[in-house]
Image (spheres, helix red, strand yellow):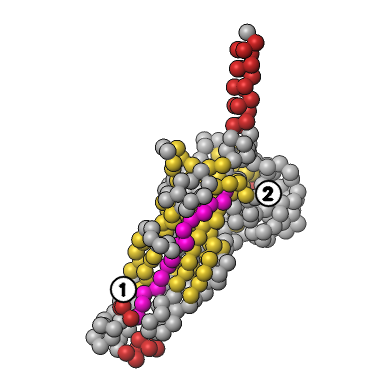
């Protein structure tokens, strides 16, 4: 009897441990050699980016190990430009070295180690020597090659040259990564992802309590202490970008003024905040996100809805509680 009681107690404690954040879910081992496909959000260039710059993206495919999904498709990813080489004339293409730093799950960011991914501009020595006389134009080509040495390489050649004079004048071949480009990184030995503090890049910014202007991405929350549950699907960086583009494309579908951000009615500004309930006088003024936009996003639980109001996109539950929001005119 005592043995059975002790077994039940141990099973109960084990279940509780797994349910606690940071215990059963604290380490998500990513085996070395795992491919991590990331859809890039920011544009990067060897002529403009600096070593240490942060970039953002989302997982284009889930990360899996031993048949288990560690991180879902669409999870937020942050990375860093580890090295930059500016393009020289004729023979030296630009180069970007990129690494991933964190992958987010819910409201927690996990650090991750990968091989540096080398992005190279097209070399003049290889592409122009045989073409300068004929003045052939070079089309834009982006190719990804997995694995190998320092990392994978992406060659990017843009435009062309007509004669040696034009080649010398336009001389540079920058390494460029455009938004929506999918890059494949490879995890390294010792790449067990461990919990780190979520930074401003992983968690949405909080609106300024005393202003209706767009908040700084690094601002801290003030006002209400009520927070959305960790399992609530907040707006990811990709969600925000997709919604902004889609709302712009479907602007004719919205009533006048819905997508613009004027001053809110007196007394209402402090309640249009995360964790607050949308004021009753505003609840009939929100407009659902068009179906064309919803189809580009992950499906929400049945008790949540994305709506547009006064230049803001809100994530509401059935009780009109605001779980998340962002500003359509805020460039992130």
Picture coordinates of residue 101, whole percent (x, y): 55, 56
Q: Residues under labels 2 and 1: Cα distance?
A: 48 Å
| Residue 122 as seen in the image, left or right of residue 189 | left
Front-most of residues 50 and 201: 50
Q: Residue furthest left?
A: 134
Picture coordinates of residue 28, whole percent (x, y): 53, 42
Position of residue 309 relative to residue 119, above or below, is above
Magenta range is 110-124
Position of residue 303 relative to residue 5, above or below, is below
Q: Which residue is mark 1?
A: 139
Q: Residue at x 63, y 34 (%)?
A: 20
Position of residue 80 relative to residue 134, above or below, is above
Magenta stretch containing residue 121, yes or no?
Answer: yes
> Tag 1's secondary structure?
loop
Q: Is residue 302 visible?
A: yes
Q: Residue at x 68, y 42 (%)?
A: 227
| Residue 272 as seen in the image, left or right of residue 300 | right
| Residue 132 as seen in the image, left or right of residue 267 | left
> Tag 2's secondary structure?
loop
Q: Which residue is mark 2?
A: 273
Q: Residues within 10 Å of mark 1 (few under 14, many from 20)?
A: few
Picture coordinates of residue 80, whole percent (x, y): 54, 62
Which sits earlier in the primary sequence, circle 2 or circle 1?
1
């Amino acid at each position: 009897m005592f043995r059975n009681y002790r077994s039940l107690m141990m099973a109960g404690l084990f279940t509780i441990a797994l349910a606690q954040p940071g215990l059963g879910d604290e380490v998500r081992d990513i085996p070395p050699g795992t491919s991590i496909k990331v859809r890039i959000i920011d544009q990067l260039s060897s002529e403009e980016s600096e070593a240490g710059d942060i970039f953002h993206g989302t997982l284009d495919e889930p990360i899996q190990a031993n048949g288990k999904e560690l991180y879902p498709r669409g999870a937020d990813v942050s990375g860093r430009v580890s090295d930059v080489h500016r393009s020289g004339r004729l023979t030296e293409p630009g180069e970007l070295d990129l690494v991933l730093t964190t992958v987010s799950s819910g409201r927690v960011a996990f650090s991750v180690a990968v091989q540096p991914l080398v992005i190279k501009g097209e070399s003049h020595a290889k592409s122009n020597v045989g073409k300068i006389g004929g003045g052939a134009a070079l089309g834009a080509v982006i190719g990804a090659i997995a694995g190998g040495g320092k990392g994978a390489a992406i060659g990017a050649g843009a435009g062309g040259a007509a004669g040696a004079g034009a080649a010398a004048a336009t001389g540079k071949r920058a390494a460029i990564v455009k938004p929506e480009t999918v890059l494949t990184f490879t995890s390294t030995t010792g790449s067990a992802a461990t919990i780190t503090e979520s930074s401003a890049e992983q968690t949405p910014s909080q609106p300024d309590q005393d202003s209706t202007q767009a908040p700084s991405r690094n601002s801290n929350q003030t006002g209400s202490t009520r927070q959305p549950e960790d399992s609530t699907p907040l707006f990811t960086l990709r969600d925000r970008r997709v919604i902004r583009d889609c709302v712009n494309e479907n602007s004719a579908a919205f009533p006048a003024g819905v997508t613009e951000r004027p001053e809110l009615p007196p007394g209402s500004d402090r309640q249009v905040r995360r964790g607050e309930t949308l004021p009753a006088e505003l609840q009939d003024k929100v407009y659902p996100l068009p179906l064309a936009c919803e189809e580009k996003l992950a499906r929400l639980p049945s008790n949540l809805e994305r709506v547009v109001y006064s230049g803001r996109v809100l994530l509401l539950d059935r009780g009109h509680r605001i779980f998340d929001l962002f500003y359509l005119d805020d460039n992130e």
